[in-house]
Image: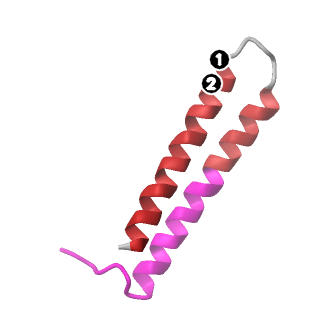
Amino acid sequence: MIGKLLAVLLLLIILGSLFTALYRLTQKKDDSASVVKALTLRVALSIGLFLALFANYYFGLIPLRG
């Protein structure tokens, strides 16, 4: 149960980072460094989420359904 909650929380943080980058991209200021930082954070969190899901499956915390 905690694993599912953390996965959903991490997905919400990823979406928040994506919308932060979109907001900073649409501003009139030419501040591309903050957009790049937000998108880099999103990519890193996404990779971390996939690695955590694969590790949970490998250790049997997530059962295979099918």
- Is the residue 55 above or below the residue 10 in the image? below
Q: CA distance from mark 2 to mark 1?
A: 5 Å
Residue 50 is a magenta residue: yes
Question: x%, y% of residue 28?
Answer: 74, 11
Amino acid type at image mark 1: Thr
Q: Position of residue 59 (x, y in %)?
A: 44, 88
Which numbered marker is on residue 23? 2
Instruction: Please name whichever residue, 43 or 4, is drawn nearer the observer in this view of the structure.
Output: 4
Q: Residue at (79%, 15%) from the top-left corner?
A: 29
User: Residue at 40% across / 80% down in the picture?
Assistant: 57
Residue carrying label 1: 26
User: Which kind of residue does numbered mark 2 sit on?
Assistant: Tyr
Judge whether residue 46 is colored magenta.
yes
Residue that protrudes farthest toward the left in the picture: 66
SS state under label 1 = helix
Q: Secondary structure at mark 2?
A: helix
Q: Is residue 21 above or below residue 45?
A: above
